[in-house]
Image (cartoon, rainbow, N blue to C red):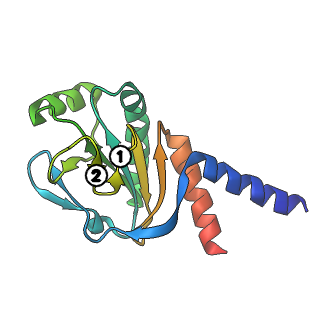
Amino acid sequence: MKKNILKLVNLLFILLLFTLTAQAEDIEDIAFKSLEGKVVNLADYRGKWVVVNYWATWCPPCRVEMPELSLFHEEHKKDKDAIVLGVNYETNSVKEVKKFLKEQMIEFPIVREKDGADGRTTSFGVLKGLPTTYMVSPDGAIVATRVGMINQKMLESFISKYNEMSKK
């Protein structure tokens, strides 16, 4: 009985952290543009977790969570099991964005929508607010979305719980 209650609590915890997608979506056609102008395909990261985080320099919650995303990225870069892909969603020049990233010491990959930010849609659909984070599983499925701030502990917990649930 205690074991079942604990499983239920864990599941509810995950649901509070992220909204699980009703149906996993495929990432085959999702591509971004690096700040250097190169195409970055989301499918190239198959085999590892991808934390796709939409943010802007003018967004206070985005600025608060950037160091947490950076810590998560650095921690997982060693094991090559996860990556943070920051999607800068604004119209500031690339020069301004690079200056911000340097000042904040952010080193995870930063990209932009291939066709630019239009204030409404993204490669994942309608943007409901910033920051917004999508979790892409190692098999290439978009498995969760969160509108609002996240931190390293939330990301670690989600991945751990998701992996546990997937094994059953």
CB within 8 Å, label 2 to label 1 = yes
Q: Residue 64 lies in what quarter of the image?
A: top left
Q: Residue 80 lies in what quarter of the image?
A: bottom left
**Looking at the rendering, in which quadrant would you find the C terminus?**
bottom right
Residue 140 placement, left or right of 145: left
Relative height, residue 163 to residue 62 (above, below): below
Front residue of 52 and 73? 52
Relative height, residue 145 to residue 98 (above, below): below
**Looking at the rendering, in which quadrant would you find the N terminus?**
bottom right
Q: Residue at x 75, y 52 (%)?
A: 9
Question: Element under label 2?
Answer: strand
Cα separation between marks 2 and 1: 6 Å
| Residue type marked 1 | Leu
Image location of residue 68, percent across then percent down? 44, 36
Relative height, residue 5 to residue 27 (above, below): above
| Residue type marked 2 | Thr
Image location of residue 107, percent across then percent down? 27, 40
User: Mark 2 Cα within 10 Å, few/some/many (few <14, many 20+)?
Assistant: some
Q: Residue at x 83, y 57 (%)?
A: 5
Q: Which mark is residue 127?
A: 1
Q: Residue at label 2?
A: 122
Q: Residue furthest right?
A: 1
Question: Element under label 1?
Answer: loop
Image location of residue 134, percent across then percent down? 42, 53
Going from the N terminus, do you reach mark 2 or mark 1 first?
A: 2
Relative height, residue 127 to residue 168 (above, below): above
Front residue of 57 and 138? 57
Q: Residue at x 42, y 47 (%)?
A: 133
Residue 160 placement, left or right of 23: right
User: Mark 1 Cα within 10 Å, few/some/many (few <14, many 20+)?
Assistant: some
Image location of residue 7, percent across then percent down? 76, 60
